[in-house]
Amino acid sequence: MSEINQFDWVDFYKELSGKLLQYKNNRSELVEKVKKIYEITGLNLPTLEKDNQIVDIDPFTFYGLFNKKLTDANRLSILRAVAELFDVKAPVPTAFDSIPVLNPQNATFYYFIPDRGDDDIQDLWELFDAALAYAKNPTSETIAQVSKYFDLCINKKGNGNSKITMGLYWIAPNSLLNLDQRNTWYIYESGKLPGDLVKTLPAIESKIPSEKYFAIVEKLRAYLQSEESQLKDFKELSFEAWRYSEQVNHEQAAAKKAEAKRDNQGAAIADEGVETVHYWIYSPGDGAAFWDEFYNAGIMGIGWDKIGDLSVYNSKDEMKQAMKEKIDPSRPYKNAAHATWQFANEMKPGDIVFAKKGMHQVIGRGVVESEYIFDPERSRYKNIRKVNWTHKGEWDHPGQAVMKTLTDITAYTDYVEKLNSLFESEVEDDVEVSVETNLKPYDEDKFLEEVYMSKPKYDTLVALIKKKKNVILQGAPGVGKTYAAKRLAYSIMGVKDPSRVMMVQFHQSYSYEDFIMGFRPTQEGGFELKRGAFYDFCKSAEVDSEDTPYFFIIDEINRGNLSKIFGELFMLIETDKRGIELKLLYADEKFSVPKNVYIIGMMNTADRSLAMMDYALRRRFAFFDMEPGFNTKGFRQYQEGLQSEKFNKLIDRVEALNADIAADDSLGEGFCIGHSYFCELKETSDQTLSGIVEFELAPLLKEYWFDEPAKAKTWIEDLRSAIK
C-alpha cells in the first residue's frame, strides 16, 4: 500500500504533537490559540466548556477540533490555521479517508466544570506525554507509564475504547492501535484476519484495561510484521478496515434496495438521493403512561381503535371518512388519516423510529421488525408493529419536535442526523454522555452594544424583517453588514443559537444546483442527486415550531445570477406564499419555504462591477440602508475608551470625507466610509492607524475618484495629516 495519499496526515500530526507538548505547562496560551483558530477560519467555536468560558483543554480534545465529522473544506480550513499558529512545516494533509473521527456531540475528552475531577485534564496530558515517549522508545518503563494513564483516562466519565484509542492513534499511528467500531468489527467479526489469531485476542470490553489493550497491540503487530499478512502496520490495517466496511455497507444497502424493488416497496422512492430505510418521529399522545408496556412488549401502537383494522381501508380518504362516522363528524382528521395510513401501509421492517414525549424530549430509538398487525385481544392500541427498542432513556430533543402522532422525517436529513447523534455517542463509548446544550441569551441590548446602530433604526429593521421576512442590508464597505446580520438574527431569536443560522456567499458561478438541488458527478463516474444549502436549511426549519425563527443569510447577494439561483423559489419566498408547495425541478416531490424562515441578504452599494438587482427579486425584499455608525452611542463610547487624540482626529477627517463623498454626484451616500475599518483595535499606535489609511482607505479613494486623481490624492494626504 502506498502512503503517498491516504497517509499524508501522519507527518503533519507527528510534528504537531511535538509542538503541542510544549503547552503542557502553558495551557492558558493554548486556549487563546484555540480561540484564534476560529477567528482565522470564521467558523463557530465548538462548545468546549460550559458557556464556552474555556479555562483549560487537553491535547486529545485539541486534535478532536479537526478529527470529527466535518466537511473537508472546514477541516482543511482548521488545519491551515493550526499550521500557521503552531508553525508546522509538514504539508497540510489533503486525504482524510480512514482517519477515525469523533462524534461532534461528544467531542471533548473531559466533562465540563463542575462535573469533572480536578486532575482529569492533567491526566490526559500525562497520557499524551507518555504515549509520545513510548512511540520514540518502546521500553517496559514507557509502556508502564502509558498503561498507568491509559487506565485512569479510559475510566473517566464520557470516555471509552473508541475515544481513548483513536486519540492515541492520531498521535502515534505506527505504535498504537485504534479500537474504534470499524477497527473492532474488522479485527473480530469481518473474517478478514485468521481465526486462530482472533481466538487468542482478549475480548473487547467497553472500557478495556491497558493490560488487555497492549496484548491486542502486540499480537496484531507481530501478525502484521509476519509474511502471512499483506497489511504491514496499524495504518494499513485501519485503512483496510475503513475501506472494507464502506464496501460492505454499500453492498448491504444495494441488497436492501433490490429487495425493496422486488417487493414493490421502492416505488415511492423518486430518486437515488432517498434511502430505502425511512426515519419516523413517533408519539402515542395520551398513551405516554403505556411506555413501559410498549418497551417490554417490543411494540409500537397508534391507537384509533374505534375504526378497527387499518388494513381494510383502501385510501386515506376512506380512513378519514371512517373516523368521521365512528368518532366525531365535526373534526377534519386530515393529519390522523395520513398518520394511520402511513403506519399501516408505508412503514416497513428496517425503518428507524425515534420515540418522543412532549415537545422537548426523546425517550427511545428502535428498529421496526414487523409488518402492520391488528391485535383485537389488546385492551388498547390494537394497531401495532413489533419494534426492537435499541435505546431507552431520556434525551433532550435537538430543537422542538413536531406534535403529530407519526411523521416521516426521512427527507429532513439534517434533523435525522441530529437525532441519530443523540444515540451515536452512547453506542460509541457505551456510557451515558452529557451534551452541553445551554445557549447564551442574546437580546436587543446586546445587539446595540456590539453593532453601532441607533435604537430607532434597530426597531425599524426588526419590524421590517418580521413583516417582510426577506430583507437586504445594503451599504458602503465597512458599515458592518456581515457583522450585523448574524447578531440581528440572534437578537430576534433571543438566544445565540448557530444551529438556526446559516450563511452562504453568492458569486458568478453559484447555481440552483448549489442552492436547492441538482445532479452531481460521483467518484464511480455516475451522477447522484444532491440537496443544496437552502433546501436542507428549510427542511431543518420545517420540523420545528412555526414560532421558532430560522435565518438564512446571503452575503454578496447581488453577485449571483438570481433568476438562475432561485428558480421556482421566486414565488415561494414571498411572505404570503410561505407554506405553499410547488414541485421541484429535479425531484418528484413538492417543496415549500416554511413560515419560520427569514432571509437576510447583504449588498455592497459601492461595487461598480455589480449588475442591477433582478427586479422580480427586488419586489420580494425590503431594502435597509446600513450607514456609518460614527455618531452612534456605542461607537462614541468605544472611541472614548481608546483615549487617543490621533484616533479622534482621524475619525473627524473621515466624517468630513464622508460629507464630500455624499455630496459627489458620481458617488453618493452609498459610497461613504464605514466605521468597521476602525473597530476592535487593541491599540492606536501610529503604525496601526497608518496601516488603515495606507492599505485600506487610500486604495478605496483611488478607486472612487479614478477619474479625479488629484482629488483622491488631496483626501489621502488629509487623512495622513491627522495621524502625524
Image (spheres, rainbow, N blue to C red):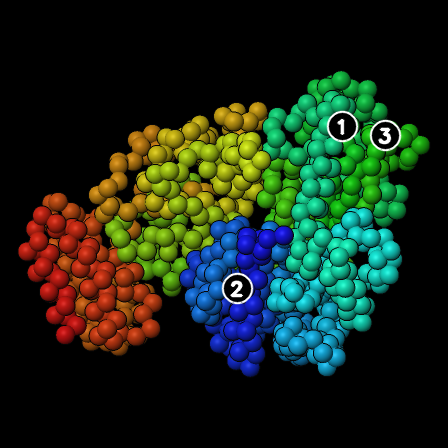
Q: Residues within 10 Å of mark 1 (few under 14, many from 20)?
A: some
Q: Nearer the viewer, residue 478 or 451?
A: 478
Of the numbered discs 3 and 2, the one sitting upstream in the chain is 2
Q: Is residue 654 left or right of residue 513?
A: left
Look at label 2 and name its amino acid.
Answer: Phe
- Residue located 62% across and 56% down the image: 99
Q: CA distance from mark 2 to mark 1?
A: 45 Å
Image point (79%, 52%), residue name = 193
Three-letter amino acid code at disc 3?
Answer: Ile
Residue designated by label 1: 259
Residue 12, which numbered label? 2
The residue where tag 3 is placed is: 373
Placement of 235 over or under 333, stated as above or below: below
N-terminal label among 2 and 1: 2
- Disc 1 on helix, strand or loop? helix
Residue 231 locus on image (x, y percent) = 70, 54
Could you tell me how far apart the alpha carbons at marks 3 and 1 are, in whole angstroms? Answer: 22 Å
Most foreground residue, 200 or 588: 200
Q: Quadrant of residue 614?
A: top left
Q: Position of residue 372 (x, y in %)?
A: 82, 29
**Foreground label between 3 and 2:** 2
Residue 269 coordinates in the image, percent (x, y): 65, 27
